[in-house]
Image: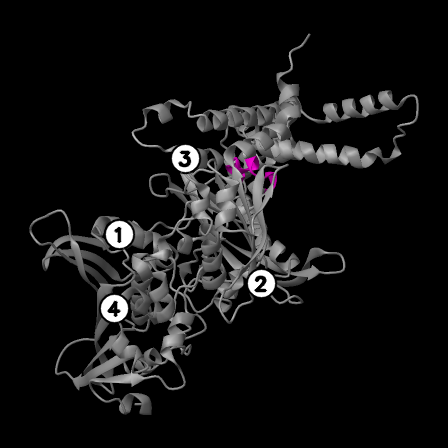
Amino acid sequence: MSDIVKNLVPNEYIRGQGVYYAGAIKAIKKSSDELQGLWEAVTNSFESLAETNSRDGYIVIRFFYSNNGMYKDIYDFCKLEVEDNGVGFNNTNFERFIQLKDDRKGPKNRGSGRVQILHSFDKTEYQSLFIHEGKLYRRSFVLSKANDFIQNNAIIRYIRTVQEKSGLPSTLMICTGVLDKSKAYDQISASEFKATFISHYLPYLCSIRSDMPQITIECYLNEERIESESISAQDIPAEDKTSDISINYSHFNSNDNKIERIDKSEKFTLRCFRLPNEQLPENKISIISKGEMVSGINLSFELLREKDSIDQHRYLVFLEGQYFDDIAGDTRGDLLIPTNDDLKNNEQLFEYDQNYITLDSISSVTNDEFKKQYPEIAKKEKDFLDDLASLEKMFLLDREATKRSASKLGINATPEKLLKSIYDLDSETAARADAKIKQLVDDLEGITPTNDNYETDLGNRINDLVRLIPIQNRTDITHYVARRKIVLDVFQKALDRQLEMQKKAERNIDEKILHNILFQQSSEDPGSSDLWIINEDFIYFKGCSENRLFDIKIDDERIFRDEFSAEEEAYLTSLGEDRKKKRPDILLFPDEGKCIIIEFKNPNVNVSEYLQQIPKYASWIGKYTKDKFFTHTFYGYLIGQSIEPQDVLSVDAEYIADSHFKFLFKPSQKLYFGETREKGSLYTEVIQYSVLLERAKMRNKIFIDKLLKKHQ
C-alpha cells in the first residue's frame, strides 16, 4: 500500500498537494454534452470491468424520481446510481483517482474525467469493494466541489476503508444534486435512454460485441422500480466493412502561401456500418478517441446528406487511430484539429512552423475510401454530377451556385429542387454579379473617351458583360431591387400609420413594427436584415437584435465575463434594476474593438429623454466584457421621429445640429471603463425615421426608376 493511501485519515478531506482545486477545476471546461458526467461514470465502469478476467461483468444504471402526489405526471429527479462489478477502487485505482491529472492508466486517460462529474452533480458518493492481498475491503468516499470541499482545497472526502467478511468486488456510485439547473436528467425513460446509450457508446460496444457485459437501465419512482431495459449483443449492429488508410501531415508554405502535404503520415482504421433507415436516423462520420465518438468536429460525406438513404439504408463511419488518442485534451473527446484555413491564417492555437494532419485531409481521404468501399455511392455521385453539369449548361447556371446547392441538397436531389435552390441564392448571386461588374470596370483602363467610337466601344463592353451574366442572375438583381422598393414602401406606410395592424392594435406598437422591418427582433443574422436603410455596410457585420446584453455571443462565445466582483454585482442590481437583463435594440460588431449600438424609439416619444441610454450600454460593454472582446470605439444611433433639436441641446449641449443632412451628432464622448482599461470613445447620431427613409429612397432611386420604367 502506498504512503498516500496508508496515511489517509477517516472522515477527513484529502487536501491537494501542489494543486489549487478552485483554479484547476475551472481550467477544465464543462462538456457541452449535459450527460457527460454520467458518461464518465459509465466509462469508468467499462474500464474497471476491462481489468477483470470475468465474463460475467455487469453495469447497472438507475434513475430515481419522486412526485408529491398532486401532479402524478411530474417527476422530480432524486439521484443517479451507476453500479458495476469491476475490480473496484483498490489502492492503485484510488491513488490514481486522488491525483487530478494522473495519466498512469495509459495515454488515453488524463485523469480529468472526474471533473465532468464535479461539474454535473453537487455530491457523488462511492461504495467500492475490492481485493487487497487476498482479502476483501470496502472503501467509501465522497466527490464534490461544494464550498466546504473547495475551502479545504479538496474535491474528495475520505470516509473509511474496512475489511469485509464476504462479498465480491463491485462499485456503487450515487450522484445527487444536478448542477447548473440542467434538465438532462428530467424524467428519463429507460427505453429512450437505451437508444441514447447505444448511440453514444456504439463504437466501443461494437468492439466488445462478442463479449459484452450485462448492461441494465432502471427507472424508479418513489423507490419503486417502474421500468427496466437491458442491452445485449443483439442490440448492437455488426460492422459491414473495415479498411486501413494513411493520412499525410500538412505544412503551411509561407513563401507560396499554400498548404503542402509532406511524406510523413499516420495510420487510421475506417469502420463502416450499413444500417436500415429505422435503425440509423442520420448518415454520420465520427472520429473515435478513447473509445468514444468525438463531438464538436464536423466531418461529413461529400454529397450524401444526413437524411439521404440508398436502398433504404444509411451509413455510419468511424475513423479511429492512435493519433487521435495522443492529441486528446483534458476533456474526454476534446480534440484540436486545424483546418487548412487555420494554418494559413496562423491561428494562435497552432504552431506556425509545425506539421499537422488537417481536417481537410481527414475529410478528403475518408470520403475517398468510403466511396471505394461502397461503389454504389460512387456511381450515384457520378450520375448526380453528370446531371448537374447538364443543368448548368442548359440553363447557364452560375458555377458557384450549382456547387453550393449540390452540397446542400445532396445526391438524391431532383432537378426541380436543385434549380429552386440555385434561384433562391438571389442576394448572393447579385453580389457575384457586382464582382463581375467590378472586373469589367478594372479592364476599362484601355478605353479612350476622346475617340469617336467611344460610345460604340463602351456599348460593346456592356453587351459583353450582359452575355456573361446568366438570365437567372439578371432576374436575381431585379428581385433584389424590387424587394428594396417594397421594403421602403412598407416602411413609409408604417411611419404614416397606414398598416392594418396599426389601426387594429389596442396599444401603440409602432416602435416594434419599425424595429422588425429593419432587423427582426431576436435575430442574429444582419445579412438577412434591411439595415441597409440606415447604412449599407451594416448588413455585412456580425450582430444581434433584442438579445439580453449579458448573454450576447460572438462566434458562439459569450462576450461578457462569467463572474463579477461583489462590488460589481451590487452595482448591476442597484436601484431595483437588473442591468444584466437589459436588451439593446441592435448591436453590431464591424471589427475588433468596435461596436455599433442602435436604439429605436416610438415615433410619439421625445427622443431627448433617452440620450443617456446608448452611453450606458457602451460603458457596460467596455467595462464588463472579457479581455479578448474588449471594445473601445463605439458608434451610437438613436432613432425616433419626435426629435426637437433644442430639447436635445438642452440635455446635452455637445450635440451639433446638421441642417443639411437633417440630424444631430456628437463627434466624441469619452467613456470610462475602470482603472484597468483604457478609456473609450463614442460617436452618436440622433436621427428621424423619416430622414433615414428619405436617404434610402435617394440611394435606390436610380435603380428603382430603371426597374419601373415603362417601355415607350
The kind of residue tagged 3 is Asn
Quarter of the image with the C terminus is: top right
The kind of residue tagged 1 is Lys
Residue 2 percent location from the top left of the image: 32, 90
Mark 3 or mark 4: name the one nearer the start of the chain: 4
The structure residue drawn at horizontal position 35% and vertical position 80%, both measured from the top left corner, is 96
Label 2 belongs to which residue? 266
Residue 571 percent location from the top left of the image: 36, 64
Residue 190 percent location from the top left of the image: 21, 52
Find the magenta span and give its range: 527-537
Q: Which class describes the residues within 10 Å of circle 3: few (<14), some (14-19), or many (20+)? A: few
What label does residue 223 carry, if any?
A: none
What label does residue 604 carry, if any?
A: 3
How far apart are the alpha carbons under marks 3 and 4?
Answer: 52 Å
The structure residue drawn at horizontal position 64% and vertical position 58%, both measured from the top left corner, is 345
Q: Residue 144: within the magenta?
A: no
591 on left or right of 230 = right
What label does residue 122 carry, if any?
A: 4
The kind of residue tagged 2 is Glu
How far apart are the alpha carbons under marks 2 and 4?
Answer: 42 Å
User: Regarding mark 1 in the picture, which secondary structure is present there?
Assistant: helix
Work out which residue is located at the far right of the displayed protein and give it. 451
The kind of secondary structure the magenta stretch mainly shows is helix
Mark 2 or mark 3: name the one nearer the start of the chain: 2
Residue 57 percent location from the top left of the image: 25, 66
How far apart are the alpha carbons under marks 3 and 1?
Answer: 59 Å
Quarter of the image with the N terminus is: bottom left
Q: Residue 536: within the magenta?
A: yes
What label does residue 194 carry, if any?
A: 1
